[in-house]
Image (tube, coloured by chain):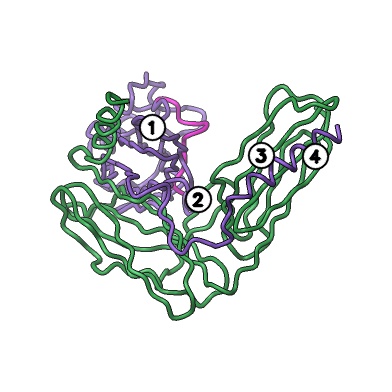
Chain colours: A green, B purple
């Protein structure tokens, strides 16, 4: 245990200090629920050397993939749009409640300002703002004939799901698929792959998130 | 069977027992200690066609040459087109370290000083540069909608190689120098 702590510290320090030309941003995700008119200041720690630009752009998920929409995120405003960093710097970003009901997803992009105007390799930190009181939380679950499980967020609020899919054959559980920290944006559909080693039986899906829980049963045959 | 289903629901109920019923006002996930490191930018390629244009005019249909990375050209007699990248261009290498899963999203690239259509520019991500087709090779025209080019897992360091090449056809008008700029964003697990 005593050996483990310094080792962990070294590991964290190693990740925290980017090599020359690199940038590191912490935290890697932010979720806010704000009442209309509310504003928050979120602090990010940027590590690296040089000048970095900050900009927020909209994104959505298409299946498992992030898609930049280019949509303006005017409710996310870095206090400075460009910062000089020498080692480490805390950057403040003002975030206010959105007009739109439900969750709005943006990426806070932090990227180096290249000499000569060239662009750019940056980090995009997901930043979710949900307007309190407007949440419509809904999840559709389907079990496909091959055992995969389809999840669709049919509400307007980000779902962050955890739970499991239990595969039952001949009265006993033969596989269990754990679901952790599984993000599902409004309108997005994602598919949970089925594990190896299942043949014919029944899948029991149990998921919870945003204060709700869902279950679904469905047959499969492979 | 019924007993198993009952047990599963019971377990699920127990899992919920510690749920406090409130949606967190501010969540920084997984924790404030999370860091994310990227190096290697900017991703920019410059093609200088000056010498190639001279070769092209002198000998437009040379036999297929051996491909040495991006340094030699290929002439395909059947299609009257050839791939080449000038000698001053090879590849760019990106290094990504993260303690959370992530995706690399390719933005909309820009080309300056070119009259060629975007479909003639090929970008290879983390693939054998001598292979001009298949997964991991994108034409710039396909990138008008941002594309995830790599999905990474937590831990360790990933080195991504990015290559650029141009498909030039007979009678193409080639300016002296062209520059492709490729915006890339590394997005931690959403």
Along the viewing direction, whichever of B70 and B170 lies nearer the viewer? B70
Residue A211 drawn above or below residue A190: below
Secondary structure type for disc 3: strand
Above-or-below relation of A36 to B27 = below
Q: Are marks 1 and 2 in one subunit?
A: no
Which disc, if any, is residue B155?
1
In screen coordinates, is A40 left or right of B149? left
Residue plotted at (60% across, 49% down): A161
Give the Cα separation between the discs numbered 2 and 3. 24 Å
The answer as to whether the residues below labels 2 and 4 share one chain is: no
- Residue extending furthest toward the top: B66
Say which of marks 3 and 4 sits in front.
Answer: 4
From this viewpoint, which residue is outermost toward the left? Answer: A86
**Residue at x-position 63% and y-position 49%:** B16
Is B138 covered by the magenta stretch? yes
The part of the chain drawn in magenta is B130-142
Chain designation of label 2: A
x, y (%) of residue B106? 42, 47
Q: Which comes before the other along the chain, label 2 or label 3?
A: 2
Specify the subunit that label 1 lies on.
B
Q: Are marks 2 and 4 in contact (CB under 8 Å)?
A: no
C-alpha distance separating marks 3 and 4:
15 Å
In the picture of the structure, the residue carrying the numbered disc 3 is: A164
Q: Position of residue A135 (x, y in %)?
A: 60, 69
Chain of the residue where label 4 is placed in the rendered structure:
B
Residue B23 in the image, given as x and y percentages of width and height:
53, 62
SS at badge 1: loop
Q: Which residue is mark 4?
A: B6
Closer to us: A53 or A16: A16
Location of residue A134 by image quarter: bottom right
- Which label number is shown at residue A66? 2
Is disc 2 in contact with disc 3, using a CB cutoff of under 8 Å? no
């Amino acid at each position: 245990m005593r050996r483990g702590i310094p080792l962990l510290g070294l590991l964290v320090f190693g990740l925290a200090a980017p090599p020359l030309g690199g940038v590191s941003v912490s935290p890697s995700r932010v979720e806010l629920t704000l009442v209309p008119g509310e504003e928050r200041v979120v602090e990010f720690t940027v590590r690296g050397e040089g000048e970095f630009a900050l900009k927020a752009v909209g994104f959505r998920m298409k299946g498992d993939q992030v898609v930049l929409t280019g949509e303006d995120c005017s409710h996310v405003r870095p206090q400075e749009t460009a910062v000089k960093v020498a080692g480490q710097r805390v950057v403040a970003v003002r975030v206010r409640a959105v007009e739109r009901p439900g969750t709005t997803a943006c990426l806070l992009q932090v990227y180096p300002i290249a000499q000569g105007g060239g662009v750019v390799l940056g980090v995009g930190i997901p930043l979710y703002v949900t307007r309190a009181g407007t949440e419509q939380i809904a999840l559709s679950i389907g079990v496909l004939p091959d055992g995969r499980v389809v999840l669709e967020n049919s509400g307007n609020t980000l779902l962050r799901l955890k739970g499991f899919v239990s595969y039952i054959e001949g009265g006993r559980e033969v596989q269990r698929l754990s679901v952790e920290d599984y993000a599902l944006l409004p309108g997005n559909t994602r598919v949970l792959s089925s594990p190896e080693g299942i043949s014919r039986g029944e899948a029991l899906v149990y998921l919870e998130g945003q204060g709700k829980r869902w279950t679904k049963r469905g047959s499969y045959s492979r | 069977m019924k007993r198993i289903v009952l047990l599963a629901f019971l377990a699920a109920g127990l899992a919920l027992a510690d749920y406090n019923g409130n949606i967190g006002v501010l969540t920084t996930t997984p924790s404030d200690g999370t860091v994310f490191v990227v190096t290697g930018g900017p991703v920019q390629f410059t093609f200088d066609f000056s010498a190639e244009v001279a070769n092209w005019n002198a000998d437009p249909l040379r036999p297929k040459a051996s491909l040495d990375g991006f340094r030699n050209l290929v002439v395909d007699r059947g299609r009257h087109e050839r791939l080449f990248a000038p000698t001053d261009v090879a590849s760019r290498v990106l290094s990504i370290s993260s303690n959370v899963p992530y995706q690399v999203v390719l933005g909309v690239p820009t080309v300056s000083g070119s009259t060629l259509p975007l479909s003639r520019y090929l970008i290879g991500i983390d693939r054998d540069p001598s292979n001009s087709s298949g997964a991991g090779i994108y034409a710039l025209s396909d990138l008008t909608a941002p594309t995830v080019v790599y999905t990474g897992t937590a831990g360790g360091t990933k080195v991504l190689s990015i290559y650029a090449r141009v498909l030039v056809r007979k009678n193409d008008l080639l300016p002296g120098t062209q520059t492709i700029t490729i915006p890339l964003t590394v997005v931690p697990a959403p």
